[in-house]
C-alpha cells in the first residue's frame, strides 16, 4: 500500500463515521418538565389528616429516605390546596403537648426520617374545600440548593391530627 491509498482509506472511513453519527441524533428523548428530585431522595406513605373542625389546620405525614452519600436539607414544604404550610415538630412542654416550627430539616446521607403523629409533620393552613376524605393532593418539598420533590398524599378523616393542634 502506498501513502496515497492509506490517506484515501482514512478519508473514506471518516466519512462513514460522520454519516452514522448524524443519523442517530433524531432519537434523543425530550427532558421531563417536572422539577428535579435530588438524587437518592424518595418519599413513601404520604397521607394527610383533615381537621375535625373546618378552618383548623390539617397535618401531612410521610417517610423520606436519602439513599445518596450526601446530606440533604429540606427548607420548605408546600401542600396543594392549602393557603400555606410549614414543617413542625411535636414535643412536650410542662407535660403538655406543644409544637414548634422547623425551619430546616436535615435528612442525613443513608438515613430516613419519618413524619408521623406526635413528631415531625407538615402543618397545612387555610385548607381548600377541594380537599376531601378519600381524595388525594400533592405535596412538594424544597431542598437547600433549589431541588424539589413532589409526591401524592392520601387524604384521611379527621381524628389523626396530633393532640394540641386541632383545638
Ligand atoms: Cu403543627
Image (tube, helix red, strand yellow):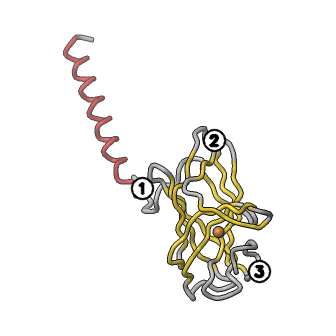
Q: Is residue 17 left or right of residue 76?
A: left
Name the residue tied to disc 2: 109
User: In the rendered structure, are the residues bearing label 2 and label 1 in contact, judged by CB atoms less than 8 Å apart?
Assistant: no
Image quadrant, ligand 1: bottom right
Q: Earlier in the sequence, mark 2 or mark 3?
A: 2
Q: For the residues marked 2 and 3, what is the alpha-carbon distance in whole angstroms?
A: 34 Å
Q: Is residue 107 above or below residue 137?
A: above
Are the residues tagged 1 and 3 within 8 Å (C-beta)?
A: no
Q: Residue at horizontal 52%, vertical 54%? A: 37
Q: Earlier in the sequence, mark 1 or mark 3?
A: 1
Whether residue 33 sits left or right of residue 46 in the image: it is left
Picture residue at 73% right of the left edge, 82% below the top:
158
Q: Which residue is situated farthest in the right direction here?
A: 95
Residue position marked by numbered label 3 in the rendering: 159
Read off the residue under disc 1: 29
How far is the residue under mark 2 from the one under mark 1?
A: 31 Å
What is the quadrant of the C terminus in the image?
bottom right
Q: Nearer the viewer, residue 47 or 97?
A: 97
Circle 1 SS class: loop
31 shown above or below 129: above
Can you give x and y, in whole percent of width and height, for residue 43 in the image?
64, 59
Residue 90, given in percent of the width and then of the height, sits at 71, 63
Q: Residue at x 57, y 88 (%)?
A: 129
Pair 2/3: label in front: 3
| Closer to viewer: mark 2 or mark 1 | 2
Amino acid at each position: 500500500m502506498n501513502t496515497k491509498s492509506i490517506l484515501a482509506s482514512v478519508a473514506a472511513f471518516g466519512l462513514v463515521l460522520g454519516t452514522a453519527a448524524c443519523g442517530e441524533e433524531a432519537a434523543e428523548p425530550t427532558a421531563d418538565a417536572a422539577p428535579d428530585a435530588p438524587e437518592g431522595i424518595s418519599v413513601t406513605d404520604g397521607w394527610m389528616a383533615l381537621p375535625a373542625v373546618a378552618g383548623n389546620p390539617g397535618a401531612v405525614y410521610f417517610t423520606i429516605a436519602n439513599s445518596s452519600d450526601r446530606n440533604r436539607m429540606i427548607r420548605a414544604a408546600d401542600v396543594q390546596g392549602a393557603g400555606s404550610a410549614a414543617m413542625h415538630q411535636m414535643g412536650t412542654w410542662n407535660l403538655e403537648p406543644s409544637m414548634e416550627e422547623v425551619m430546616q430539616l436535615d435528612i442525613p446521607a443513608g438515613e430516613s426520617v419519618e413524619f408521623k403523629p406526635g413528631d415531625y409533620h407538615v402543618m397545612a393552613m387555610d385548607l381548600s374545600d377541594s380537599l376531601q376524605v378519600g381524595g388525594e393532593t400533592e405535596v412538594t418539598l424544597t431542598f437547600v440548593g433549589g431541588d424539589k420533590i413532589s409526591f401524592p398524599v392520601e387524604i384521611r378523616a379527621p381524628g389523626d391530627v396530633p393532640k394540641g393542634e386541632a383545638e
